Amino acid sequence: MNKLLKNSIWILIAALGAAAVGGIALNRGESINTLWFVTAALCVYAIAYRFYAAWIAATVLVIDETRATPAERLDNGRDFVPTNKWIVFGHHFAAIAGPGPLVGPTLAAQFGYLPGTLWILFGAVLGGCVQDMVTLFLSTRRDAKSLGQMARDELGALGGTAALIGTFAIMIILIAVLGLVVVNAMKHSPWATATVSATIPIAMIVGLYMRSFRPSQVLEASALGVILLLLAVVGGGWIDHNPTLRTWFDHEGLTLAWWVMAYGFAAAILPVWLLLAPRDYLSTYVKLGTITLLAVAIIMLQPTVKMPAVTQFIDGTGPIFGGKLFPFVFITIACGAISGFHALIASGTTPKLLSNERDIRMIGYGGMLLESFVAIMAMMAATVLDPGVFFAINSPAGVVGKEAIDAVAKISSWGFPVTVDQMQLLANQMGEATLFARTGGAPSLAVGMASIFGSAFGESMLALWYHFAIMFEAIFILTTLDAGTRVGRFMLQDMLGNIWPKMAETSWMPSVVLTSGLVVAGWGYFLYIGVIDPNGGVNILWPLFGIANQMLAAIALCVATGILIKSDKLKYAWVTGLPLTWLVTITSAAAWEKIASDNIRIGFFSAANDLADKLAAGALPPEKAAVTPQLIFNLHLDGWLTLFFVVLLWLIVFDMLRVCSRYLAGKPVLPLTESPHTQSRLVEDWVRD
């Protein structure tokens, strides 16, 4: 009877999910309620986690909860630390959930709500969640080695070295974009800057509280941290309204960029328990609380989606970024569906904290499902705005014009009416001077969230809701930036350790400081070129970010597929092989367009040539002419980097196929590097829990 009841419930969930997805996909010409999106997402995620993830964990990976993890075997109190599973989940989710699930869907909304929503749902359950869980498992079984090092150990010198170089170079690009989004959100916003700055000492207070003052009192420390974070939001508003104090936090983008670099360096060298883990854990409370609150508000209000299902910009003429629906919707959504960056976290900090293998499904697959839900929320928050307002906030001045009157005329001509008075009123309500050309996706998402919160919980607090949303987004981003910098340090130490083994020791301070400095210098340069870009940096860095991120996911799936085949699991290789095939297709297509297109809004080289011609003809205003040589260099650099990444990807794919074909033919290949089974001493404690 119980089995029949359970089966009936799951059949009901499947039917409800299918009806919701069908309603979203088939709706044309009529308004659609956001409740359809929430229902579709929750049903799809529930079925995927209960059945698909459980099958992969039990049958494909064969999880063993009696096996000691690297955190237990290599515990050094600094990087390898057995940690409570909920804190690990909090760290992992906070580290992977950066700007991608927030900014990507917001930017992709220029195509309409339908393409992005479908990719977020099905790309996550079949690709992103699988990549995260499998990579976490493989790294845990290999002493928490990085993705690049696993590739070198399992595939060999050629493909492995390409993967090491490629993953590290891509990581640098990814972190730079994280920094750019948070700088654009905090630029000339004292409220946002003060609030975000306060989160750093708050995290250290919580870390010290749990480590020294009240060890193991997780609930006490959590309550303290959440209260201090909420006070930081209110305090930021007080600072913003104080004529003296607000000047301390009112900065240009370049100044903020330097501070972000300093924070990244500190986060990479300080003990993980002092800043990284408590900050990520606390930010998870804020993230989950905010997303839950947003879901509750949407269920209460059931707002109507105002953006069309598909817009005219699927032809590649979109104002926010150039490029057709295929392949650019897939690389723009990025982390909301599948993200290579997650593979770096899943083979970086998380396996060094994991206490038991049985938590891999919850942390790996479940963490990505939660991020995908964040992306669905972001898509809804963006598409419930009037389309004219959405495009006014996100369209760069270089496309719609610097003057407000020119911008509204241009946007209205597309069929999305908006007025100067409407935008000014909205800016006043949000506590900002202007909302025109606030590129990067973060401000428009904050406006959408504030509008929903205001309608549900009080219109009089719109400014507070807006800046709470900005803090929410900035916390998302900075927790990914700090974890990414630390993972970048691990990756560089792994690479240098192949030359000088001492450099691979994560506890040797000279190596820690040197590699952390090199990683920050690398992503700091790309952050700098994004900040000085007159178009806000999104056009020049986000496409490269999307392509690089998806290529990194393809590399991770390449390594996973190769290891599955070498482990005599050929019949299960499709689990990683199918998403790998799709990613190689879309990234190669996008890279080709960014390299070869003669459209100056798409091709890196064509855009550089166009700027060079205008500069030579004296057709640029003085302020833009001053930075044009740097922009030309940066566009050429982006183009060559894209070519470099796609060559590396195909090299790794062919090397993986070579290794697999040799193994299947019975020819010698490198042996599996899985560490020997060691019985866990913690398993009894976990069983009692």
Image: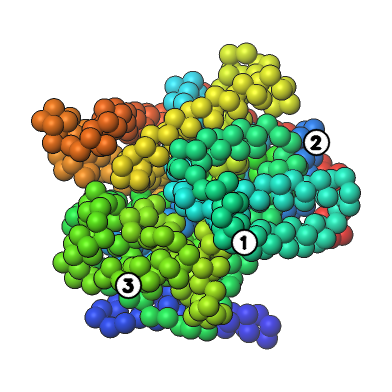
Measured Cα–Cα span from mark 3 to mark 2: 55 Å
Mark 3 Cα within 10 Å, few/some/many (few <14, many 20+)?
Answer: few
Camera sees residue 658:
no
The residue mark sitting in front, 3 or 2, is: 3
The mark closer to the camera, 1 or 2, is 1
Q: Secondary structure at mark 1?
A: helix
Q: In this view of the protein, which residue sits in the foreground, 578 or 534?
A: 534
Give the residue at mark 1.
238
Question: Label 2 crowding class (10 Å Cα cut-off): few <14, some 14-19, many 20+?
Answer: few
Residue 69 in the image: above or below residue 464: above
Report helix, strand or loop for mark 2: loop
Query: How far is disc 3 from disc 1 in space, using C-alphas?
Result: 27 Å
**CB atoms of marks 1 and 2 within 8 Å:** no
Task: Residue at 18% x, 41% y: name it.
Answer: 600
Q: Position of residue 478 (x, y in %)?
A: 57, 47
Residue at x 10% of width, y 30% of height: 617
Q: In this figure, which residue is indicated by the disc labeled 3?
A: 422
> Residue visible at 21% across and 45% down?
601
Mark 1 belongs to which amino acid? Trp
Asked if residue 316 lies left or right of residue 649, the reply is left
Q: Quarter of the image holding residue 429?
A: bottom left
Residue at horizontal 27 percent and vertical 37 percent from the top? 623
Q: Is residue 235 above or below residue 591?
A: below
Q: Is residue 354 above or below residue 58?
A: above
Q: Are marks 3 and 2 in contact (CB under 8 Å)?
A: no
Mark nearest the camera among 3 and 1 is 1
Which mark, residue 77?
2
Element under disc 3: helix
| Crowd class of label 1 (few under 14; some 14 to 19; many from 20; radius 10 Å) | some
Mark 2 belongs to which amino acid? Gly
